[in-house]
Image (tube, grey):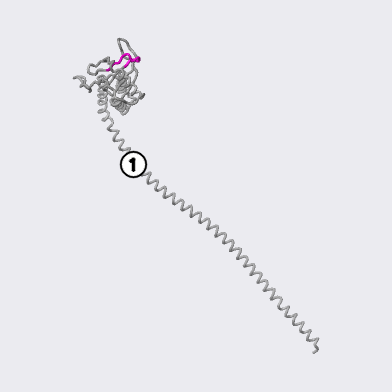
């Protein structure tokens, strides 16, 4: 067979091979493309799934945090309710105690009102027998206490407080020194004078021009002219007014006297 024939057969065989191979390669390419497409879909779906998972995880975390917060609030509310219940129980006990005490108030008032009346009477009698410093003012205050006893707008507790305050002022006067200005009948006429009180043992007066000085004699219950003590009274007035430092004063002192029969405080 001529060489040209062999060459022709070779070309034909090669063409047949190519024709046979081409469909197979196309099928493989399609499979490869499908695989790539499938892989891409898997990746896309995996990414979407991961986003969903992340979203669900975030929501779960938020719900968990909210649950923990609500649980903490619930514990706090339970503790608050327990404390509140204890407070309510204590208040109920106090209310019960107060109600019981209020049931005895009338009995207490029945006993304390006569006592307060005796205290006022004793105070008025004490002022009457005491050295007569600020006499009219003290008598007015004592009379006001007596008037208040008939005032229904003033509670028993307030009345008792007013009486004890008056007693406290009287007690305080026995431990203090005071200077004040007032009126006194001197040489048959009423004059403005300076008074010096030292506790309850010294009560002296001095005219404003210092021409006359006198002191109260508790034994005879009258004023006695004591011009020999003029300088001492001047110094005492200065000490009482804090115009000079305290110093030794020589003044007539009336010793306390026992009240006469029938004049003792009630």
- Residue 265, position in %: x, y? 23, 22
Q: Is residue 70 above or below residue 103?
A: below
Position of the C terminus, as image quadrant, is top left
Q: Mark 1 points at which residue?
A: 90
Residue 262 position within the rendered picture, expressed as x and y whole percent measured from the top left:
19, 19
The quadrant of the rendering that contains the N terminus is bottom right
Q: Quadrant of residue 253?
A: top left
- In depth, the one of 188 and 151 nearer the eye is 188
Residue at the limit of the structure toward the top, as seen here: 188
Q: Is mark 1 on a helix, strand or loop?
A: helix
Magenta includes 207? yes
Q: Observer-nearest residue: 10 or 127?
A: 127
Span shown in magenta: 206-215
**Identity of the residue drawn at 76% across and 84% down:** 10
Q: Bin the neighbour count of mark 1 within 10 Å (Cα to Cα): few under 14, some 14-19, many 20 and up.
A: few
Is 56 left or right of 81, judged from the image as shown?
right
Residue 108 to residue 129: above or below:
below
Q: Nearer the viewer, residue 37 or 144?
A: 144
In percent of width and height, residue 206 lies at 32, 16
Q: Residue furthest left?
A: 261
122 relative to 92 in the view: left or right: left
Horizontal and vertical percent for residue 230? 30, 17
Q: Residue at x 55, y 59 (%)?
A: 54
């Amino acid at each position: 067979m001529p060489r040209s024939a062999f060459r022709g057969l070779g070309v034909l065989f090669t063409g047949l091979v190519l024709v046979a191979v081409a469909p197979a390669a196309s099928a493989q390419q399609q499979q490869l493309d499908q695989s790539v497409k499938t892989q891409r879909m898997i990746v896309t779906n995996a990414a979407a799934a991961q986003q969903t998972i992340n979203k669900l995880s975030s929501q779960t975390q938020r719900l968990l945090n909210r649950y923990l917060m609500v649980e903490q609030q619930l514990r706090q509310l339970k503790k608050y309710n327990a404390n509140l219940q204890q407070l309510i129980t204590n208040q109920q006990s106090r209310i019960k105690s107060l109600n019981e005490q209020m049931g005895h108030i009338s009995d207490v008032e029945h006993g304390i009102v006569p006592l307060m009346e005796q205290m006022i009477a004793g105070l008025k009698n004490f002022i009457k027998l005491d050295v007569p410093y600020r006499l009219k003012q003290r008598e007015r205050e004592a009379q006001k206490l007596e008037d208040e006893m008939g005032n229904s707008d003033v509670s028993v507790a307030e009345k008792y407080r007013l009486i004890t305050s008056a007693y406290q002022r009287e007690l305080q006067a026995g431990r203090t020194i005071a200077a004040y200005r007032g009126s006194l009948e001197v040489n048959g006429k009423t004059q403005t004078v300076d008074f010096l009180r030292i506790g309850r043992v010294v009560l002296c007066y001095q005219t404003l021009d210092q021409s006359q000085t006198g002191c109260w004699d508790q034994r005879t219950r009258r004023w006695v002219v004591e011009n020999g003590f003029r300088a001492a009274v001047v110094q005492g007035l200065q000490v009482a007014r804090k115009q000079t430092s305290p110093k030794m004063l020589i003044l007539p002192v009336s010793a306390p006297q026992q009240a006469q029969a029938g004049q003792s405080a009630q």
